[in-house]
Image: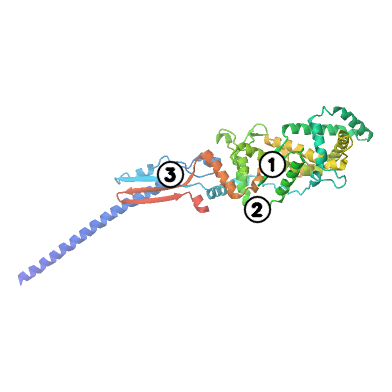
């Protein structure tokens, strides 16, 4: 009986030994797993924090220049990671920049950047589209039957060699005296001098609107007709919603350099927050004109932009002159003298009514004024939006316009995607290739942890 009890106790002890061994093994596995899990958690946190640290290394200059949060490189690429994993033993870390800055990203940048800054700018003043027809200038006059092509070459010949016709001027003066318009001769000769000056500087200008272009010259009837057609197309274009494009247009207009080197003589050209463009790149590039035209050759962008500026000023100045009784009276007086001059030069074969020539003279006066306005704007000085005392008095300081003010309107006609693409190209020229995200991997033995992140600005907008 005693032997049986001892045997039973021995069996219990043996069972307990097996049970304890299993518990010890399980505890060892659990502890080892927990330790491994702890190391993996540290690894994951190290990679995550290192990525956050890398994203904080966006270039502050690029943020000030263009409002862009982006990376071009990462200097301290694993400092945080090494500090957090120094007790883990054999670990490794690698990364790469991802997500190149795209047009949609730039759209998000502009929205965020201009949300606070846009309120500091006055609301864009939209010019009313003027519906002025000057077809009578380029077509045949129904009353006299004499079109501009019949007499303009003769007038051009006179301007090219006034000395040759100087004996005939005496005849013109006598005829004007006889007809009682000799008091208009001084205005006529001033008009001729102004026209000769502008013609010598700019005999023709290229103007482009959308896909159409025209060579502008006041001495070529076909060019005048082309100009009229181009401006008609300009007036017929549907304006996009200003609300959808206002922030983008303000950003484009004031964040990129132009062909104007300084304003009002000594004020440096700066971006929207006052940083001189010469700090962003060493020479004037005409980026604003590139946004409008999109040509790789800066000279083409310059001429086309100036042509559009000239056309816009021509519309405004011609409209102002048509509303100005004084200008119309001066133009009529000049037209009377011009009518006599044409008759004398042609030996009486060409007779043109002064009332017909009056609007031609007004157009040429407006062209001269528009060209001078364009050169004034390009020099960095202001010109009135509209040469009318009532308009000027009503608008006050807003009546003065500068070169960039016209691009607020012009850029509205550039498709949004095209404008974004061109802006991104210009930014890339100054900043290089920009990235908005980073992908990183940390490894510990056979364990790896991968993180890919972007700036929340781009994630939220896309």
Q: Residue at x 52, y 44 (%)?
A: 68
Q: Give x and y (percent) for residue 202.
A: 72, 34
Q: CA distance from mark 1 to mark 2?
A: 25 Å
Nearer to the camera, 333 or 23: 333
Query: At 75% from the left edge and 33% from the top edge, which residue is drawn?
Result: 199
Q: Residue furthest right?
A: 178
Q: Residue 185: x, y in percent?
A: 87, 32
Query: Around disc 2, counting alpha carbons within 10 Å, would you say few (fewer than 14), some (14 to 19), or many (20 or more)?
Result: few
**In this view of the protein, which residue sits in the foreground, 256 or 337?**
337
SS state under label 1: strand
Asked whether the residues under the numbered discs 1 and 2 touch, taking CB atoms below 8 Å apart as contact, a structural biologist would say no
Foreground disc of the pair 1, 3: 1
Residue of label 1:
207
In this view, the mark in front (1 or 2): 1
> Residue, x 52% and y 49% (percent of image)?
105
Q: Earlier in the sequence, mark 1 or mark 2?
A: 1
**Distance in Å between CA atoms under marks 1 and 3:** 49 Å
In front of the other: 178 or 8: 178
Residue ID at (49%, 51%): 456
Q: CA distance from mark 2 to mark 3?
A: 40 Å
Mark 1 or mark 3, earlier in chain:
3
| Residue 239 spot, x, y in % from top left | 68, 51
How busy is the neighbourhood of tag 3: few (under 14 within 10 Å), some, or many (20 plus)? Answer: many
**Badge 2 is on which residue?**
241
Instruction: Report which residue position mark 3 lands on.
Output: 54
Q: In the rendered image, is residue 401 in sight? A: no
- On the image, which quarter does residue 14 sit in? bottom left
Whether residue 97 is visible here, answered yes or no, is yes
Q: Quadrant of residue 224?
A: top right
Asked if labels 3 and 2 touch by Cβ distance under 8 angstroms, the answer is no
């Amino acid at each position: 009986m005693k032997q049986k009890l001892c045997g039973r106790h021995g069996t219990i002890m043996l069972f307990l030994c097996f049970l304890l061994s299993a518990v010890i093994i399980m505890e060892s596995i659990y502890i080892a797993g927990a330790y491994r899990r702890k190391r993996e958690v540290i690894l994951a946190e190290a990679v995550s924090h290192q990525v956050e640290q890398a994203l904080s290394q966006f270039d502050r200059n690029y943020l000030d220049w263009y409002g862009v949060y982006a990376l071009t490189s990462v200097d301290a690429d694993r400092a945080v990671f090494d500090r957090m994993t120094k007790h883990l033993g054999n670990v490794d870390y690698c990364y790469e920049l991802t997500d190149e800055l795209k047009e949609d990203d730039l759209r998000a940048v502009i929205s965020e950047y201009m949300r606070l800054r846009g309120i500091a700018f006055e609301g864009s003043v939209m010019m009313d589209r003027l519906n002025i027809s000057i077809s009578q200038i380029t077509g045949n006059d129904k009353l006299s039957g004499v079109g501009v092509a019949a007499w303009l070459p003769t007038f051009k010949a006179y301007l090219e060699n006034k000395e040759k016709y100087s004996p005939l001027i005496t005849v013109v003066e006598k005829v004007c005296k006889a007809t009682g318009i000799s008091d208009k001769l001084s205005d006529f000769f001033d008009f001729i001098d102004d026209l000769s000056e502008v013609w010598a500087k700019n005999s023709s200008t290229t103007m482009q609107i959308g896909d159409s272009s025209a060579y502008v010259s006041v001495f070529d009837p076909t060019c005048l007709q082309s100009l009229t057609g181009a401006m008609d197309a300009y007036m017929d274009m549907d304006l996009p919603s200003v609300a959808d494009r206002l922030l983008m247009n303000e950003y484009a207009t004031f964040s990129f350099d132009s062909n104007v080197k300084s304003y009002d003589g000594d004020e440096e050209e700066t971006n929207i927050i006052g940083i001189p463009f010469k700090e962003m790149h060493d020479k004037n590039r005409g980026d604003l004109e590139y946004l409008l035209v999109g040509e790789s050759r800066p000279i083409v962008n310059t001429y086309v932009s100036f042509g559009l500026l000239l056309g816009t000023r021509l519309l405004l100045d011609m409209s102002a002159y048509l509303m100005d009784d004084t200008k119309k009276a001066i133009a009529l007086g000049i037209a009377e003298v011009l009518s006599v001059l044409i008759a004398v030069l042609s030996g009486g074969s060409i007779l043109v009514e002064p009332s017909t020539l009056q609007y031609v003279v007004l157009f040429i006066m407006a062209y001269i004024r528009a060209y001078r306005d364009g050169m004034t704007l390009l020099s960095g000085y202001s010109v009135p939006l509209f040469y009318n005392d009532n308009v000027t008095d009503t608008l006050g300081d807003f009546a003065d316009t500068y070169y960039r003010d016209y691009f607020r309107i012009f850029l509205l006609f550039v498709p949004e995607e095209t404008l974004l693409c061109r802006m991104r190209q210009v930014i890339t020229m100054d900043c290089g290739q920009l990235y908005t995200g980073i992908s990183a991997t940390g490894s510990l033995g056979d364990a790896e942890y991968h993180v890919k992140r972007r700036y929340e600005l781009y994630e939220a907008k896309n």
